[in-house]
Image (spheres, coloured by chain):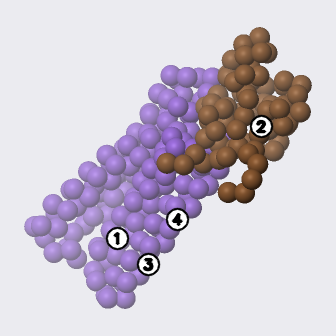
Chain colours: A brown, B purple
């Protein structure tokens, strides 16, 4: 089955470099459940723009450092 | 598993048990008496009690098992709920149409009532199953 989204992300890496922040900790800070954050990390769910910005803000990086979208048309 | 996913599973279970039992009992009555002589109304009203009790108890257990996540709902839960309700809505509409056909064919009210009840039960089950699939597979 195809992945529901082509968006990829670096959240796991960013968490690791942020003092090994847990999924639960990050989820609390951006106001989603731990399960939703896990779904985002696994590419099973594309978050709203608002949540995406919140994640980038937690790590103090630009949005494109957190989320990437492949070049080229499908 | 999130609170809302566990909630969907609990509701499917409660509905399947209670409504399954109801349809089994009424189905047995139908084998011994004609439809327009069956007094199903008291059983249908009484069946609501175990359904509510099961729903409340299961949600209580889910909440107590993980109090921190009890009732938690975010944008993904709301999106999954909406998609589940949409799929369930199609089933319900189809069932209502079926009930209408039975009414136009002037079948006993027993059949019309149960076609509508079955449509609602199936719609709820499909809604819950859709939510679970979306939680597992991704949205």
Q: Is residue B72 visible?
A: no
Q: Residues within 10 Å of mark 4 (few under 14, many from 20)?
A: some
The x and y percentages for residue B65 are 50, 22
Q: Residue at x 43, y 78 (%)?
A: B97
In the picture, residue B23 is in which quadrant?
A: bottom left
Task: Using residue B80 as the reference point, say whether residue B60 is left or right of it.
Answer: left
Q: Mark 1 or mark 4, which is nearer to you?
A: 4
- Give the residue pinned by disc 2: A67
Q: Name the residue tied to disc 4.
A: B89
According to the image, label 1 marks what residue? B115
* Helix, strand or loop status at disc 4: helix
Q: Are marks 1 and 4 on the same chain?
A: yes
Rendering coords of residue A13 (x, y %):
72, 22
The residue that mark 3 highlights is: B97
For the residues beneath circles 4 and 2, the answer to whether they share a chain is no
Q: Residue at x 64, y 39 (%)?
A: A43
Q: CA distance from mark 3 to mark 4?
A: 12 Å
């Amino acid at each position: 089955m195809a992945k529901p989204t082509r968006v990829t992300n670096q959240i796991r890496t960013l968490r690791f470099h942020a003092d090994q922040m847990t999924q639960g900790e990050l989820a609390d800070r951006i106001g989603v459940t731990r399960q939703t954050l896990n779904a985002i990390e696994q590419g099973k769910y594309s978050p709203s723009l608002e949540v995406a910005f919140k994640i980038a803000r937690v790590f103090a990086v630009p949005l494109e450092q957190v989320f990437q979208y492949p070049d080229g048309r499908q | 598993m999130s609170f809302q996913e566990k909630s969907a599973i609990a509701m499917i279970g409660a509905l399947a048990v209670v409504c399954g039992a109801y349809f089994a009992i009424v189905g047995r009555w139908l084998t011994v008496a004609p439809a327009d002589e069956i007094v199903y109304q008291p059983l249908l009203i009484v069946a609501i009690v175990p359904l509510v009790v099961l729903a409340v108890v299961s949600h209580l257990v889910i909440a107590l098992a993980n109090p921190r996540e009890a009732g938690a709902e975010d944008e993904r839960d709301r999106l999954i709920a909406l998609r589940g309700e949409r799929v369930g809505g199609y089933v319900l509409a189809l069932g209502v149409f079926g009930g209408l056909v039975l009414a136009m064919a002037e079948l006993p009210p027993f059949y019309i009532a149960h076609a509508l009840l079955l449509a609602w039960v199936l719609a709820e089950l499909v809604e819950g199953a859709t939510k679970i699939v979306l939680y597992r597979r991704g949205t």
